[in-house]
Amino acid sequence: MNEFKIGDIVQMTGNVMTGNVGTVVSVDDSRGLYLVRIDGATQNYFAATDLKTFTA
């Protein structure tokens, strides 16, 4: 699991929260998921296949 690291800015591409942009705040190696914080109150776990590096 090295597609993304803590601090990376990513955009959601899967079925959940598609188009939103957030920051990787944790990596759960055992489950193969990244915890992404979208704003001060919203965060969720995503697989690498549901994320891409955000470019403005």
Image (cartoon, grey):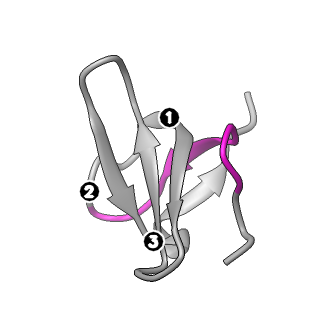
Q: Work out whether 43 lies above or below 38.
A: below
Judged by its main secondary structure, the magenta piece is loop
Q: Nearer the viewer, residue 31 or 49?
A: 31
Image spot of residue 50 (x, y percent):
46, 66
How much space separates mark 2 and mark 1, taking CA atoms? 13 Å
Instruction: Write down the residue under mark 2.
Output: 16
* Label number found at residue 22: 1
Q: Which quarter shows the C terminus?
A: top right
Which residue shows up at 75% across the image and 36% down it?
55
Mark 2 Cα shell of 10 Å, populated few (<14), some (14-19), many (≥20)? few
How much space separates mark 3 and mark 1, taking CA atoms? 14 Å
Which residue shows up at 40% across the image and 63% down it?
46
The question of residue 4 being in magenta is answered with no
Instruction: Write down the residue under mark 3.
Output: 47
The question of residue 6 being in magenta is answered with yes
Image spot of residue 51 (x, y percent):
54, 59
